[in-house]
Image (cartoon, grey):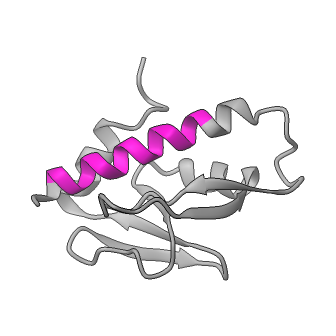
Amino acid sequence: MTNRGLAKNEELFRKVNERIDHVSASVDLDDRQMEFLCECDRTDCYEKVNVTRAEYESVRAVPTHFIVVPGHEDPRVERVAYSTGRFFVVEKQDEAAEDAIETDPRSES
């Protein structure tokens, strides 16, 4: 699969997570952990990540950052920016970073 193909899978999961975040807007940012989808590039991944809304908002503040289950990072297109005991935040690199910025749901009009 090409890097663009890998990015499409991640973009889909990021859009689903954006909907989860939108629906849960009434939950306080630090109230409790919620389940978001792993935003890795594995087409067969349906794992979930427990994240507070504040953590999610922090990750989404950077269009090239994605939340993934530890071990689901793909060094071909990203690097681990930071990790917690529950998830990794990966930062897309090169062409994958450009795709992430271009398809960021928060910048769409």
Q: In this view, does 44 lie to the left or right of 98?
A: right
Question: Looking at the picture, how far across and down is residue 58, in whole percent?
Answer: 64, 54
Q: In which quarter of the image is residue 12?
A: top left
Q: Which residue is drawn at 56% across and 38% down?
A: 18
Numbered circles on residues, count: 0
Question: Looking at the picture, how far across and down is residue 73, in whole percent?
Answer: 37, 75
Q: Nearer the viewer, residue 77 or 93?
A: 77
Q: Residue at x 33, y 36 (%)?
A: 103
Q: In this view, does 96 lie to the left or right of 90?
A: left
Question: Looking at the picture, how far across and down is residue 72, in whole percent?
Answer: 40, 75
Relative to 4, does residue 26 appear above or below in the rendering? Answer: above
Question: Looking at the picture, how far across and down is residue 23, in whole percent?
Answer: 70, 30
Q: Quadrant of the C terminus?
A: top left
Q: In which quarter of the image is residue 22?
A: top right
Relative to 25, does residue 86 appear above or below in the rendering? Answer: below
Q: Quadrant of the N terminus?
A: bottom left
Q: Does the magenta stretch include residue 13?
A: yes
Q: Which residue is drawn at 65% across and 48% down?
A: 57
Relative to 108, does residue 70 appear above or below in the rendering? Answer: below
* Prevalent SS, magenta region: helix
Query: Residues in magenta?
Result: 4-19
Q: Which of 12 and 46 is in front in this view?
A: 46
